[in-house]
Structures are given as C-alpha cells and as structure tokens.
Image (cartoon, grey):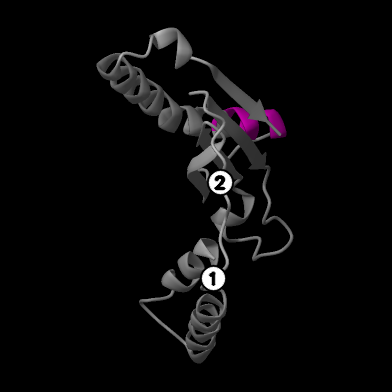
Amino acid sequence: MIFAVSQCACFTHNPKRSHEVALECIGQYLKNTLTDGLIIKPTGILDIDCYVDADFAGLWQSEDKQEPSCVKSRTGFVISISNCPVIWKSKLQTEIATFTMEAEYNALSISMKEVLPIKHCLEAVASCVGISSDEVTTFRTTVW
C-alpha cells in the first residue's frame, strides 16, 4: 500500500486521470480493509533482526533504456525488534552497481545505517530500566 501511494506521489507535479483513478482505488481498498491488520506477537527477547535484499538492475528491459534509473538496483529491508517489524524500506540505490554482489553489499550498508542507531538506543533504554546490555546485543542480519 505504501508503495502504491509513493508511486502516485511521484506525479504530483503533473497528475493525470490515471493517477486519480489509482488514488480512488487505494482509498477504496483502505475503506474495505479497516478491520484487517497485522497480528504481532513479540518474543519477549530483545533481539534485532534485519532482513535485506537487493534487486540488481531490476528495471532493465522494462523501462526506457535511455533512462538512468532503469539500471539502478533496488534495496529492500525489514528491521524487527523481538519479532515485531519496526522499519521497512524499499528504494532505488543511489549508485549504479555493476554486479549482483555489489548491489547486495550496498543494500546491506544502507540497512546497517538504520540498524546501528536502533541498537544503541535499545542499549541505552535497557541500561536505564536495569536490563543488562548482553540481553540487547543479540543481532542478526540475513541477506536474501
């Protein structure tokens, strides 16, 4: 849903009827799914998980070959604390990767810029409430 809204927002400078129809569909979807939701069950252990993936040159052959963004890779990641997602992102990488491993490393670097402040914040909060920092520092990253 967030991706659909962000795609419509790209055309605020020159909206067309198709964008209006898309926004109406999004509004109708939200209206019809008011009672739906995500059930989150925390594990009770303060661990941080980060799931990262990159799509190497994902728009190649599907968009205009003269458009520079068609060869950019897309980064996606989800960061969860105690099995509860707290941050999720999907965005084009700023640099153009020349091979898949480079795109994956770029994605990992982008996600770590979000993970490390969360880890430090959890450690600070834990020390204030009397939880040892050893219980907070459990940290896993999975690259898909």
- Residue 129 lies in magenta, yes or no? no
Q: Nearer the viewer, residue 73 or 52?
A: 52
Q: Residue at x 60, y 61 (%)?
A: 66
Q: Residue at x 59, y 21 (%)?
A: 140
Q: Which residues lie in the magenta part?
A: 100-106
Q: Nearer the viewer, residue 129 or 79?
A: 129
Q: Is residue 40 above or below residue 12?
A: above
Evaluate if marks 2 and 1 touch, with contact meaning CB atoms under 8 Å apart.
no
* Residue lying furthest bottom: 17
* Residue 140 appears in the rendering: yes
Q: Main secondary structure of the magenta part?
A: helix
Q: Residue at x 44, y 69 (%)?
A: 10
Q: Secondary structure at mark 1?
A: loop
Q: Secondary structure at mark 2?
A: loop
Give the residue number, with chain letter if any, for mark 1. 35
Residue 73, by quadrant, is: top right
User: Residue 36 in the image: x percent, y percent?
Assistant: 58, 67
User: Residue 137 in the image: x percent, y percent?
Assistant: 47, 14
Q: Please indicate whether residue 76 sits to the left or right of residue 14 in the image.
A: right
* Residue lying furthest right: 61
Quadrant (top left, top right, bottom left, bottom right) of the N terminus: bottom right
Amino acid type at mark 1? Thr
Give the residue number, with chain letter if any, for mark 2. 40
* Residue 95 appears in the rendering: no
